[in-house]
Image: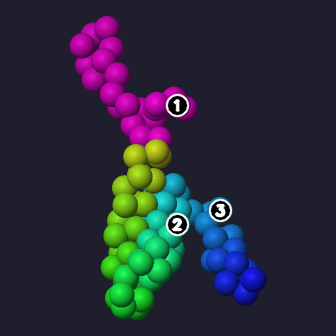
Amino acid sequence: MKTMMLLMALLVPLGACSRTEQGAAVGGLGGAAVGAAVAGNPVQGAVIGGAVGAVAGALIGRATEPGECRYRGRDGRTYIAHCPRGY
């Protein structure tokens, strides 16, 4: 129960983070938990799993963030603007 409360306390501030930051935090926590449970040395497994999970989570989070789209006008010029939602 205490572990669950600690995890909830760590995840609550993520509401103010970008998707990349959220992905890195959740991936790091999940990777550390899995690494500690699976590895022969729990500390080493948690460190390696946390690092791998944070990198993977950040990459996945960044891929889901809205970015910038390129548009070509009738005059042939290229314009850059924020993408509409869903792109």
Q: Residues within 10 Å of mark 1 (few under 14, many from 20)?
A: few
For residue 47, side relative to residue 17 (left or right) = left
First in sequence: mark 2 or mark 1? 2
Q: Is residue 58 above or below residue 30?
A: above
Residue under label 1:
86
Circle count: 3
For this rendering, which residue is in front, 47 or 87?
47
Tell me, for residue 15, which label it has, or none.
3
Circles 3, 1 touching at the beta carbon (< 8 Å): no
Q: Is residue 9 above or below residue 74?
A: below
Amino acid identity at mark 3: Gly
> Residue at position x 35%, y 65% from top?
55
For this rendering, which residue is in front, 80 or 24?
24
Q: CA distance from mark 2 to mark 1?
A: 23 Å
First in sequence: mark 3 or mark 1? 3
Residue under label 2:
26
